[in-house]
Amino acid sequence: MVRHSALSLAGSKAAEVIAVTGHQAEKVELALENMNLRLTYNSAYKSGQATSLVAGLNEAADDTDGYVFALGDQPLISQSVIDLLIDSFAASEGKAFAAAPFFKGRRGNPVLFSSALRKELASLKGDEGARGIFRTLQNEFPDRIVPVEMVGEEIFWDFDTTEEFNQLQEKFKAL
């Protein structure tokens, strides 16, 4: 699942891909072997999702325009979704603070944040990730968010439990 998620990112228009490991790092690193990405280990992963986001941010190039934060448990996110976020963000010509996928009015993942928010992103703590920053943008700067309309619900599907993973496997068997 992690490898499939990473393949979409590694094959996208993203200038660089940084995979942050933590829980079961050795297994994840093995799954990501021989891929066009860099690995970094988050020793504080037990403190929440934000620590992984910050660990990846700390490894990112300083001269980037933005950061796509994607989850390793969303294998149905395609390369075209990543590229569409990047293209939509770039089309704003530096005016956007974020680009996010939406389906029927509901936001999903991954989200692309402007490098103008690096300081705010670097200060995140806990297990919420960047949701609070996105909510602030929605409330204070809604015109600086690029909504990217999706044709499917894959932006909502992540697999946190064994039951959810088994349901995913059933979906693939049915194809």
Image (cartoon, rainbow, N blue to C red):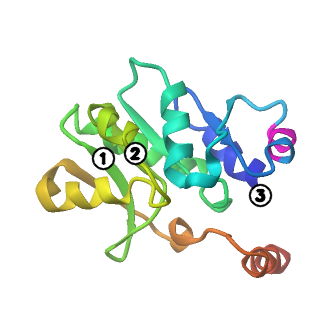
Mark sitting on residue 112: 2
Residue 30 part of the magenta segment: yes
Report the residue at 51% width, 65% height from top: 155
Mark sitting on residue 32: none
Q: Amino acid at mark 2?
A: Leu
Q: x, y percentage for residue 37?
A: 68, 30
Tell me if residue 109 comes above or below residue 38 in the rendering: below
Q: Amino acid at mark 1?
A: Ala
**Which quadrant of the figure has residue 137?**
bottom left
Residue 122, can we see it? yes
State which region is magenta. Answer: 28-32
Residue contact at pointers 1 and 2, CB within 8 angstroms: yes
Helix, strand or loop at mark 3:
loop
Mark sitting on residue 1: 3
**Which quadrant of the figure has residue 73?**
bottom right
Residue 6 part of the magenta segment: no
Q: Amino acid at mark 3?
A: Met
Report the residue at 43% width, 50% height from top: 125
On the rendered structure, is 120 left or right of 22?
left
Label 1 and label 3: CA atoms lie apart by: 26 Å
**Which quadrant of the figure has residue 66?**
top left
Q: What quarter of the picture does the C terminus occupy? A: bottom right
Nearer the N terminus, badge 2 or badge 3?
3
Q: x, y percentage for residue 121?
A: 37, 41
Q: Nearer the viewer, residue 29 or 125?
A: 125
- Give the labeled residue for mark 1: 98
